[in-house]
Amino acid sequence: MTLVDGSVTAGGVPDPILGYGFMRQHPRAWGSQLVKAGVITQDRLETALNQSEAQQSSLAQALVDCGAAEAKVIGPLAAKTLGVEFEDLTATQPDPQALVLVEEKEIRATRALPMRLLGRGDVIHVAMVDPLDIGASDKIHHLTGKRVITRLCLANDFQNTVNELFSTTSRTTGALQELESLEPEDDPVALRQTAVESASDAPIVRLVDSIMDSAVAMQASDIHFEAGESGLAVRFRIDGVLIVHAQIPPSQRSSVTARLKVLSGMDVTETRRPQDGRMRYQSHGQQFDVRVSSIRVVHGEKLVLRILRKSAVLVPLERLGFLEDQRRRFETMITQPHGMVLVVGPTGSGKSTTLYSGLNTLNDAKTNIMTLEDPVEYNVEGINQVQVNAKIGLTFASGLRTFVRQDPDVILVGEIRDQETAEMAVQAALTGHLLLSTLHTNSAVGTITRLANLGLDQFLISQALTGVVSQRLVAKVCTQCADEYRPTPETLRALGISPDELDGARVIRGSGCRACHNRGLSGRLGIYEVLAIDEEMRRLIIAGASEDAMEEAAIERGMRPLRESALYQVCRGITTPEEMGRVVLAKIL
């Protein structure tokens, strides 16, 4: 069978980025073609092959993750391998006459974007993530009544283009305009009853759905619905920063809140006490778990929705942002037969992702891994996960007591919050178990002081603690609109960076484009300091040395401070000095 443009089909399982049939079934052979073409080195190929195997994804996905420059070369070569042409969606726009022929839901379902009409209008060019998907091209033919000529496009480019063309933000605006015609209710009792009844009305449903779709499309981690005097403000947290998305009028504040409570299984009539809920939401062909929290504020209720993406915790250690020496240290820590390894940092700094990435390297049939979490956010096959439930007396401390009777090899405790949990964690580490947990401190060395403040004996800390990882998350420069620039001396001085530290570095920032929603930043990367507890550090801990003395000793023994790790990523052109200054304390010059 051949396509209408004459290329031979080679049916295969759809690949998440590009490359089907031959490329999917013979990744090494296709990778060797790229090496021969000078696109990648043999070392890069081996790294990508290992990464694709670990993630159970395609070689093409792993190679595209390496950077936009390679993606622009890999795309055309992949298209040539498939016998089709390549469509660069970052450089071209669909013709409205072609686009209008297929509805958005069909475009997303087939992953096929109509680009332009040819000849007398009886032929249509279509950019497809899988140009060899005969079912999808037949569907486009059926919908348009035209002959279909397919071209290959990158999946990320496809997603970004479709999201912009069918902007969920404009849908939110439309839904808000529709709500303006509804009459506000003055009586508080009647208002609450009206809110409950209208929670399933079409305008409210469309408004909430459009907000959720926008959040997913923009890769938001959290959605904030904040009740204020002027209505309900909607803000998204994207790459660690909150941005305003919409303002819902006061008359519809209660209805939107009620709709969210219904979806997440909360008590709609209870507005004074804090509540927690959970929902499952489907958007853009994917299903997401959403954790919901509500609390009463002055002008109503504030709800925060945390969008949980399972892929976020199934990231190989190599892709988290560890520098090579840091990763080796961390891997050594988590492969010890016993001891306590702590990952520390503020809320939202990626601690759970780091811990689960570490667990994934240990997860096999020979290892009994048990976790105690509050709440269990991601279900992972092969790991025994337990949800904390204070109502029945299942706390971190009591759960740990039970865990040690379950013959575990590795124990993960979601967080050490109090003295009792800390003491149980130390005992588990000293009795032959590898214990992983998190703690809220600002530095790796500060963790030792924090444990002592919880009431632990210095000697027990020195014997149980194997290592500490302190981390933050920095936003990465968008690779589609990155451009070199030179920060002003005033900017560098305010950020605590001396000009000498950037000598010879290629400092870049994003100008803003479609791919990054005009923010200049896209995605995040971890920066770390990894403290290994050796005999010298144990001696200092037992002696009750100051944090400054322990940090100085740790740096002498190879620990890179957070600031040094962040500066390294700035010099590599991965992030900006301003972003470094946002997450790391500035050095006083």
Image: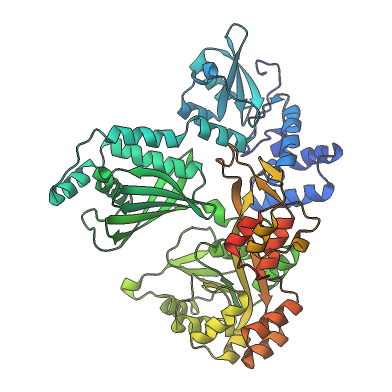
Q: Nearer the viewer, residue 109 or 528?
A: 528
Q: Residue at x 43, y 75 (%)?
A: 396
Q: How many marks overall?
A: 0
Q: Which of 436 and 68 is in front in this view?
A: 68
Q: Which image quarter is the N terminus in?
A: top right
Image check: 199 left or right of 80? left
Q: Which residue lies furthest to the front in this view?
A: 490
The answer to whether residue 194 is above or below residue 82 is below
Q: Which residue is drawn at 31% across and 72% down?
A: 391
Residue 469 % position (x, y): 62, 71
Q: Which image quarter is the C terminus in?
A: bottom right
Image check: 449 left or right of 374? right
Image check: 263 left or right of 76? left
Residue 83 % position (x, y): 73, 24
The answer to whether residue 146 is above or below residue 575 is above
The answer to whether residue 283 is above or below residue 56 is above
Residue 338 visible in this rendered orientation of the protein: no
Q: Which residue lies furthest to the top in this view?
A: 120
Residue 303 visible in this rendered orientation of the protein: yes
Q: Which residue is drawn at 57% across and 19% down?
A: 95
Residue 353 % position (x, y): 56, 61
